[in-house]
Each structure stands twice: as structure tokens, then as C-alpha cells.
Amino acid sequence: MSIPITSVVIGPEEEAAVLSVLRSGRLAQGPMVAELERSFAELCGVPHAVAVSNGTVALVAALEALGLQPGDEVITTPFSFAATLNAILESGATVRFADIRDDFTIDPDSVQALVNARTKAILPVHLYGLPADMTALTAIAETAGLAIVEDAAQAHGARVGDRAVGSFGVGCFSMYATKNLQCGEGGLITTSDDAIADRLRLLRNQGMRVRYQYEAPGHNWRLTDLQAAIAVPQVGRLAETTARRASNAARLTAGLADLPGLTTPSVPAGRSHVWHQYTVRIGADAPLSRDDLGKRLDEREIGYGLYYPRLMHHYDCYVGHPQIGTDETPRALRAAEEALSLPVHQHLADDDVDQVIEAVRGAFNA
């Protein structure tokens, strides 16, 4: 693609950091991981960040640290990547699906309707870089005595009011290669709970604090210093990266605002968007279908993404699963049929953004 939906660029700071690790001879978890944890905890305004091997492991570890049992229920959104669902299934809990709002994030009213005596946690997804309504969700959780696990895989640095995502409960971040903060594969878990942080560090290291002194059945969920070395410089640049993405998003919105049947993303008051993706909706009143728009973008060599074309639990491998509820989520179903993401990443030049706008407008006016 001449203008890709995402672009991975490794700069001189990352190269120098990786080389320093290689020369040190210490490649496994060590001081570079510790620096990543320190800087990311500071970014999120929490005392603890625990690095793990990937974002899915972050979710699995968070749920295990909370001690979920079979029969417990976790409320989440069906409009997300399958890792959200898989992590809950691995915990042994039952998944209940709340519907979403028009901004693609979980609807607190729908969450409230699902809360019952078996509910143990709410797992909102900060989708495409936009935080869920954590003010409302926190109120529900506090009233019902529920844990919050934030799937913040796409939302590094996003905020709700004066608080960063990852500070409302146990925050789970991905550092997959295409994320706003990336190291190829990696995850970060944030928390203000000392006991949860201690449990996470124990679980990721085969249940050991001291070598060969096992305190619990654990796992090898460690991140390497090589991976952390790629991420550490990016933490310091995250504000700059986010600002560039936001500028590209604003240009896209201004250029596409008047197209019939196309809805550009909006940012609710009190929440900040970090624009992991710029996702529009192509409604039934548009002059072309979402698939038609995709074909026109292909012709112009403009990258795009269909995240996520089906609800997670509608794939055959999940249908009839005993741990998955059958809750109706019509707004999420409609979003899966209408959503299309356009390039917004920080490596786009202004001319690239203009080409994206021109290609979409051309498709709508053909």
C-alpha cells in the first residue's frame, strides 16, 4: 500500500537502547524492564506497572490475580479483539456481553442491567484509543462491590478527566508491533493495589520471589530487556506521538464531515482520545456500502482496516460455548457491519492525509 493503515518505524533511540542491552549480556528480564515499568507507572499515575510477555497475558494475569472462579461472571463488550473474550474464558469465568454506545465503547446502562449476584468484574475496552465512560462504570463497580479490569490495549496515555486509563482498576496494555507504544510483543499491567501487584509479579515468574522457592503455581510471563529497550524511548515520546495522531484525526474529520451516510468519530466531553485507529461508520443511507468503499480505497492504494467485522462470540468456535452468555447487543452488531478504519498514525505526512480524504470523497461522489 502506498499509504498503509499502520507503519512500524524503529528510530535511533530504540536502536541504541537495544544495542546497549546486547552489549550488556543480560537479555532476559532486568534493568531495562524495570525502567519501562517505572516510566509507564509514572505515565499512568499509579504506583505499579508490571511488564509481561504480551497484551493477552496481561488480561489473563489480571483476571487470575483477582481469583475468579467457575460460575463467576465478567461483563464486557462483544465488539473487540478475541483476546478480550479468550482471557475471560481462560479464567474459568462466564462472559456476559453488554451493548455499546455509538462511540464504540461499552454502555454503562447495559452493564448495569447485567449486574447480578454472580458478577465479579467489569471489563471495559478502551476501543480504538477512546476510553470507556469510566466515571459511570466506576460508580457501578463501587456500588456492587465489583473489580474493574481495563482492556487498555489500544489506549496508552488516554485519559478520563484528570486520570489516565489504567488507574481505575487493573489496567492491561498491549505493546504489539502496531500499537501506539510497541516493542513487537509485550504487555503492561497497571494497578494501585499493592497486593495485586505482588501477586502479578509472583505469577509471571513461575511463582517465585527467590529462585527455587516456589510460593504459588505460576507461569513464565516475563518480558525481556531486549523488548523493553524498544519501548522505553517511546514512553518519553508518547505525548508527541499522540499529538501528531490527534492532528491527523482532526484533518480527517474536517475533510470528511459533510459526506452523506458517513459518521466520523467524536470524542465525548471529559475523555481524551489517543487515536490508535480513526474509525468511521458507513450507514445504510450512504451512497455506497462499506465493502464498496474498501474496494475504492484498494484501487487508490490506501490502507484501511475492518476492526472487527463480526462480534467475537459469533464465530463458530464460540457458538454454544458454556461460558459465553447469549446477551443481545444490537448496537454492537450494527457497528460490526458499519465500521471502517482509515490511516491516522504519526508517520503520515499532511499530503498523505489529504490523499486519504480525497480517496474517500471520490468514492462517495463517484
Image (spheres, rainbow, N blue to C red):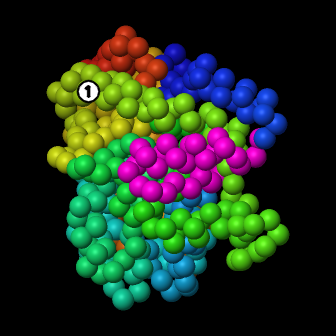
Viewer-closest of 252 and 65: 65
**Which quarter of the figure has residue 255?**
top left
Q: Image quadrant for the C terminus?
A: top left
Q: Please indicate, yes or no, whether residue 45 appears anywhere in the rendered image.
A: yes
Q: Is any atom of residue 76 visible in this view?
A: no
At 40% across and 49% down in the image, what residue appears?
A: 44
Q: Quadrant of residue 357?
A: top left
Left or right relative to 225: residue 99 = left
- In screen coordinates, is 277 left or right of 7? left
Name the residue at 19% across, 28% down: 257
Task: Say if 180 sits above or below 133 in the image.
Answer: above
Q: Which quarter shows the N terminus?
A: top right
**Image x and y of residue 47, in percent:** 45, 57
Q: Residue at x 71, y 70 (%)?
A: 207
Residue type at mark 1 is Ala
Q: Is residue 114 above or below residue 303?
A: below
| Residue 42 part of the magenta-drawn span | yes
Front residue of 321 and 67 = 67
| Residue sitting at the far bottom | 117
Q: Closest to the observer: 327 or 145?
A: 145
Height in image: 277 above or below 206?
above
Q: Which residues are magenta?
A: 27-56
Residue at point 70% right, 67% down? 209
> Residue 269: image x %, image y %?
17, 46
Label 1 packing within 10 angstroms: few (<14), some (14-19), many (20+): some
Q: Residue furthest top?
A: 351
- Residue 87: image x %, image y %? 56, 65
Q: Which residue is mark 1?
A: 250
Q: Is residue 186 magenta?
A: no
